[in-house]
Amino acid sequence: MKSVLIIGANRGLGLGIVKFLTKLRKAEIVFATCRNVSEELANVSKEHKNLHILNLDVTDATKYEEVVSQISAATGDGGLNLLINNAGVSTKFTKINLVKAEQLLENFTVNTIAPIMLTKALLPLLIRASEANSDKPVGVERAAVVNTSSILGSIANNDQGGFYPYRCSKAALNAATKSMSVEFKDKKILATAIHPGWVRTDMGGKNAPLDVETSIRELFNTLEKLGEKDSGKFLQYDGKELPW
Ligand SMILES: NC(=O)c1ccc[n+]([C@@H]2O[C@H](COP(=O)([O-])OP(=O)(O)OC[C@H]3O[C@@H](n4cnc5c(N)ncnc54)[C@H](OP(=O)(O)O)[C@@H]3O)[C@@H](O)[C@H]2O)c1
């Protein structure tokens, strides 16, 4: 890939993706956005000059155009090959009698509205990449949007209840991903919703079975194989298709 943008990359899975891409030289330019640069992310950027760190709180849509301009200036006619909407929040387990409107609003703002509006803002750069790589098949090397979803967003799989803010925001993100895949079909841009597995991060907690490195390695193994027929799917990190 020529260029990849990871949203929310100072810790957890986002940071893991940045480390994976830079270490294995999977992309010529890696853009990583975050609210605050962590020491770990700063260290990666010292070692890899192709890593560009951009400041972004995804709830501040007034900053989106600045991010788009910076990426456009750095990528030129090449555009942006891969957008990974990764930033996310999760309210702790909430039963119906405990759920608060503010939690719903926060989860929807970060997990649903931001990925949709960021994709909208970056679409011209994705189209540019798709056109610049018209000799390549549909996939992450040409132009793609990966929305980081969750198995908790699966309506069919919900047998525990609760988690209203997180479940609803990820189910809505899944719906948005499907719409993107339909709208982007003629532009030859892939759109997919990915569940990274239950992973040991601040969000996943220490009891999660997967470490970040395993999740990311398998995730990219899956992403690199995706083609036109996979656009609009809800997939697990290991390639397994999940029920909506
Ligand atoms: N870990 C799991 O088991 C698991 C399972 C399924 C899905 N996921 C999904 O995977 C993604 C990454 O999760 P994670 O486990 O890496 O979580 P995490 O360790 O809690 O990290 C969350 C990331 O999102 C960023 N973020 C949150 N709100 C933001 C905002 N307003 N603006 C910019 N960045 C913001 C955080 O930045 P700050 O440091 O600035 O807060 C951080 O970089 C999320 O979308 C999550 O829903 C995770």
Image (cartoon, rainbow, N blue to C red):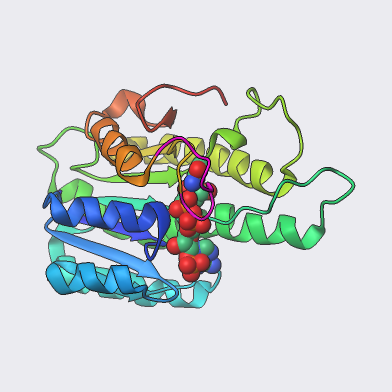
- The quarter holding residue 229 reads top left
How far across and how far down the image is residue 5, in percent?
30, 58
Q: Is residue 13 magenta?
A: no
Residue 149 in view of the camera: no
Point 80% across, 58% down: residue: 101
How far across and how far down the image is residue 153, in percent?
60, 36
Pick the quarter of the image with the C terminus. Answer: top right
Residue 113 in view of the camera: yes
**For the view shown, which residue lies furthest in the right direction?**
97
How far across and how far down the image is residue 8, in percent?
42, 62
Q: Main secondary structure of the magenta part?
A: loop
**For the view shown, which residue lies furthest in the front direction?**
207
* 91 vs 197: above or below: below
Left or right: residue 186 versus residue 150 is left
Point 64% across, 22% down: residue: 156
* 75 vs 27: above or below: below
Please provide the residue range marked out in magenta: 201-210
| The one of 6 and 118 positioned closer to us in this rendering | 6
- The quarter holding residue 136 reads top left
How far across and how far down the image is residue 203, in percent?
54, 52
| The one of 200 and 229 positioned closer to us in this rendering | 200
| Tally of marks | 0
